[in-house]
Amino acid sequence: MAPLQKVVAVYGATGVQGTAIALSLLKSQQNFVVRAFTRNPQSEKAKELARLGAEVVKADGFNDNDMKSALSGAWGFWLNTHHHDPAVEQPGGPTDEDLGNRLVEIAAAAGVKVFIYSTCESPALFTKGVAPVPGMDAKHRVELYARTFKEFDSVIGAFPGWYFENYITPEYAQAFGGFPMFPDNEGYLTWKAPLVGGEGKVQTVSIKDDFGEMVHGMFLNPLKWKNRTIQCVSDAFTYDDMVKTFTEVTGKKARHVPLASADDLPAHGNSVMIELQDVFRYTQTNNGWFFGNPDDFETCQSLKDEARRDKGLEPEPVISMTKYFIKHYGPN
């Protein structure tokens, strides 16, 4: 007798996180059905997921009826809301926390058993109110709210570090001085950022290479990770080591120019950059620990290993900063 199919609903399945998770789960040998939520089923990304076997569903998180229908019969639910979406930044409108809480309620009522949420630890708690980061603190509260619902067999928080993908994104490079894409007037690829505090190491994850498999691993054994907030990290390194390694990989001149304080990071009224100023204040106050606690690479590797076994693939270490730069900027 074939095992019962388990429907895993993936919210924002054409986004960076959602795509990585959907693509990994689609290769599972556990009889998962990947139900990919998107606002636009006709997008190229949605069509590709359908071609690979996903059940693509049109669903808008702000439409309760959409979500109730889309979550019907789902065993698992991956949720990542974008707290810089203009829809949750309107004065007097619903916040990202409001949206997250509402989707938790709908998922519980729909009978979802395993709820995994793209979350954060609370900077306000770790720094005793000295260095809050409102968006991160709000996500932490949503995770705690989800844990109060007895309808769920397991609630798990997946907390991603800084994205390696930022280093292949032009807008991000321009916001931090040009590294690793745009030389400055002296011909250097310059990284300008405040120091993160502590040992100066930046906890970073590749969403495409590692994060999708880490979350896949959580779905394989959800009771093991129940009520845990899991760090998702591939490598941790200083900015000085980062630019040095980039030069070794590419032969291009690169340098790190530290900014004196978080206030010196240009924000230009952009909500993302304003939040990043807050994040630097938080890590500077908290011994450089973005995750709130010391880095846990062992759990990340274990989750990735479990996912790869499920897909019938050989073990593979989480990607290092050196390998990431070789992959994207090394010699062809």
Image (cartoon, helix red, strand yellow):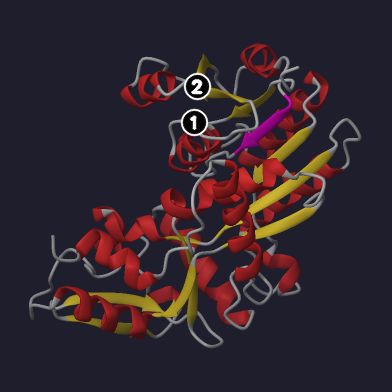
Residue 121 is covered by the magenta coloring = no
Q: Is residue 255 left or right of residue 242?
A: left
Answer whether residue 78 is magenta in the image.
yes
Instruction: Report, in whole angstroms, how far the alpha carbon at label 1 lies from the one at label 2.
Output: 10 Å
How many tags in the picture? 2
1 vs 2, front mark: 2
Q: Position of residue 242 (x, y in %)?
A: 33, 78
Q: Residues within 10 Å of mark 1 (few under 14, many from 20)?
A: many
- Residue under label 2: 54
Residue type, mark 1 in image: Ala
Q: Are marks 1 and 2 in contact (CB under 8 Å)?
A: yes
The residue shown at (48%, 84%) is 200
Q: Which residues are magenta?
A: 75-79
Q: Which mark is residue 13?
A: 1
The quarter of the picture where residue 45 lies is top left
Res 111 quadrant in image: top right
Tell me which amino acid carries mark 2. Answer: Ala
Residue nearer the viewer, 278 or 72: 72
Location of the C terminus by quadrant is bottom left
Find residue 260 and report its horizontal and vertical position in percent.
Answer: 40, 85
| Mark 2: secondary structure | loop
Q: Quadrant of the N terminus?
A: top right
Residue 32 picture quarter: top right
Label placed on residue 140: none
